[in-house]
Amino acid sequence: MSKKELLAGVLDDLKQHFGDAVLDTTTHAGDVQTRVSLDKIHQVCAYLKEKHHFNYLIDIFGADRFTADERFEVIYNIISLKTGLRIFIKTWCPEEDPQVPTVTDLWTGANWNEREVWDMFGIKFTGHPDMRRIFLPEDFRYHPLRKEFPLLGIPGSFELPTTTPDTE
Amino acid sequence: MSLDKEVTNEGYFTTSLDFLTNWARANAMWPMPMGLSCCAIEMMAFAGPKYDASRFGSEVMRFSPRQSDVMIVAGWCTYKMSHAIRRIWDQMPDPKWCIAMGACASTGGMHRCYGVVQGVDNFIPVDVYVSGCPPRPDALLNALMQIQEKVKTEHSTVYDR
């Protein structure tokens, strides 16, 4: 069986198992992207890992769609080391208090990826063991990859070191 | 026994103390390599055998700020890193000099964004700026020679003329 047929089989199985929770599937540049409803995202990931051997999480990233409703998007890039298939799972979450269930219980490596998404987009991952900023200083008050954040930053939001060492 | 009898057949020279200390300082500028990104690769070439910073007495890269004279900030500096750089700069004993190597360390360069300090002179005093992205090792050698020139003309006391 070719990879294309294998992947189609996986998607059919997903649709059969989760029904309406699998919202739409697009193919772009040979990659399949499937959008899943927010309340089923953890089950879908667990199902793909257990049943279809998607045992390797490449990356998790966020996106700011800048739309009125369901503004933020979280994308999971997972592959199966058994069949070599790759699939992108996406889910949308609202602008007000965006929360997505964590997948650190499935893939331990998701820990830092989810912290990065929190740092850059302010999307909280419920159940994450260590939900802190990863790149920016802990007292930073903004999420810089959101569209409303200015490219050059907000003056005074970062602290420069004092240039008179005795007063420190 | 007078002094001139003592030195007549021995040979001696006179100099000013400033000239002597400046000569010694200028020819033993030990760098503190603050390699932050790609400029650090050129900085390694600057210390390596081809460009050979030891011709100018600067071959001893000191990884302790306590033993170094000139800090070479090579690469772009984030706000988070700036605190570490300032702390290391404060730990260097006087007299000390600083080279901002490359466009990023001098002005922020192409990193015109929220996380990068737009020039390390925002928090440490810079003596020589080197242009280039990255600068060639010869440009860094030139910066070092500029600092040597600067050191050689320094005065320990200022005369009231």
Image: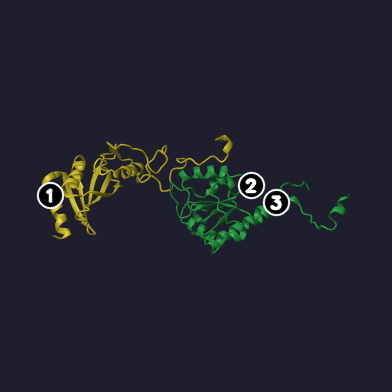
Chain colours: A yellow, B green
Between marks 3 and 2 in the image, the one whose residue lies nearer the viewer: 3
The x and y percentages for residue B38 are: 46, 56
Q: Residue at x 71, y 47 (%)?
A: B156
Q: Amino acid at mark 3?
A: Thr
- Whether residue A101 sits left or right of residue B68 in the image: it is left
Q: Amino acid at mark 2?
A: Pro
The chain ID associated with circle 2 is: B
Extreme-bottom residue of the structure: B50
Q: Please say whether residue A162 is visible from this viewpoint.
A: yes
Question: Residue at horizontal 39%, vertical 44%?
Answer: A135
Q: Counting residues from the N terminus, which is met first, the one under dot 3 or under dot 2?
A: 3
Q: Residue at 54% across / 63% down in the picture?
A: B49
Q: Quadrant of residue B92?
A: top right
Label 1 neighbourhood size at 10 Å, few (<14), some (14-19), many (20+)? some
The residue shown at (51%, 58%) is: B44
Which residue carries the number 3 mark?
Answer: B21
Q: Looking at the rendering, which quadrant does residue A148 occupy? A: top left
Name the residue tied to disc 1. Answer: A13
**Three-letter residue code for mark 1:** Asp
Instruction: From the top left corner, tell me how far across and down residue A87 is, in percent.
Output: 22, 52
Residue A43 vs B37, above or below: the answer is above
Q: Which residue is mark 2?
A: B95
Residue B153 seen by the camera: no
Q: Nearer the viewer, residue A87 or A79?
A: A79
Give the number of the mark in front: 1 or 3: 3
Look at discs 2 and 1 and give the one toward the viewer. 2
Chain under disc 3: B
Q: Do the residues at pointers 2 and 1 share their chain?
A: no
